[in-house]
Amino acid sequence: MSDWLLALHSSTETLGIALVAAEAPIEEARVMCRSLGRALTNELVISMQQLLPADQWADIRRLAVATGPGGFTGTRLTVVVARTLAQQLGTPLHGVSSFALMAPRLHQQLPELQRDQPFSIVQTLPRRGQVAGRYRIVKAEVEELESPRLLSERDQPAPAVEMAVDVPADVRQLLRYCRECHDRDLPGPWDPVLPIYPTSPVGPV
C-alpha cells in the first residue's frame, strides 16, 4: 500500500485529477482530465475512484485543490469534496487559485525585460467585465500578490497577460505544489480553503 498525494482542479469545464505516491518522483504522477461540464456533479467521485479506488482514500496524506476563479458549481463542488476529505482523514489541504497555477507558464509570455516585475493575469467575462490577479515569480516560486478579483472600469493592470487554460499542465503544477508542501511538512488546515467567486451569483463570500 502507498501513501498518496492528490490534486483536484475543476475551475473549467474540464476536470483534472493528479495523483502520485508520497515517496515517488513527480514524473510518476497519474493524471486524468475529463471534459464534463455540468456532468461534474455526478462524475466527480466516480472519476476520483477510477484513479484511486475509494478503499485507498484513507491512505491520502495530503490534498491540494484549485479554488478558482471558475464556474460556480464546479469550483464549489470540488472544494467541498477536498475539504470534507481533509477533515475526515485529518489530512493537510492546500488551496491554490487557478490563476496562480498558470502563472509560471504565462510568465514566459512577457517580454524578457518585464519578467522580473509583478504582472497580472486577466480574464475577460462576457457582459461582466474583467477578473485579474497579480503575481510575481521569484526563483521559480509563485507569489500571489493579489488574489483574482473583479476589476473596476478604472483598473488597467500592467504588465498583463490573458488567462489561458491548460488543465493537464495546471493540475500537474498543483500536484507539484502539494509535493513541495509535503516535503516541507507544512501545515494545511482545511477550514480556510474556500472557493474564489469574483462574480458570485450569491454575493461576496
Image: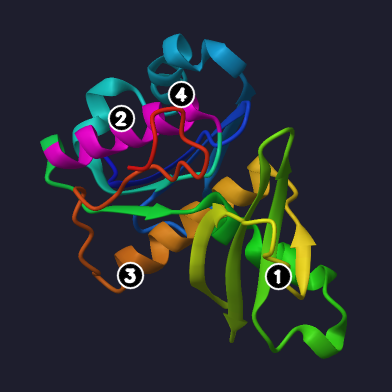
Whether the residues at callouts 2 and 1 have beta carbons within 8 Å, the answer is no
Q: Earlier in the sequence, mark 3 or mark 1?
A: 1
Whether the residues at callouts 1 and 4 have beta carbons within 8 Å, the answer is no
Question: In the image as oriented, which residue stretches furthest toward the right?
Answer: 111
Q: Main secondary structure of the magenta part?
A: helix
Q: Earlier in the sequence, mark 3 or mark 4?
A: 4
In this view, the residue in front, 166 or 203, is 203
Callout 3 secondary element: helix
Residue type for callout 1: Pro
The residue that label 2 is drawn on is 81
In the rendered image, the vertical position of residue 181 relative to residue 11, given as above or below: below
Q: Earlier in the sequence, mark 2 or mark 1?
A: 2
Residue type for callout 3: Asp
Q: How far apart are the alpha carbons under marks 1 and 4?
A: 28 Å
Which residue is painted at 30% across and 74% down in the image?
Answer: 184
* Residues in magenta, as a range: 71-87
Which residue is painted at 82% across and 74% down in the image?
Answer: 110
Callout 2 secondary element: helix
Question: Looking at the image, is mark 2 or mark 3 nearer the viewer?
Answer: 2
Callout 1 secondary element: loop
Question: Looking at the image, is mark 3 or mark 4 nearer the viewer?
Answer: 4
Numbered label tally: 4
In the rendered image, the vertical position of residue 48 relative to residue 196, given as above or below: above
Q: Earlier in the sequence, mark 1 or mark 4?
A: 4
Residue type for callout 4: Thr
Q: Position of residue 119 (x, y in %)?
A: 68, 74
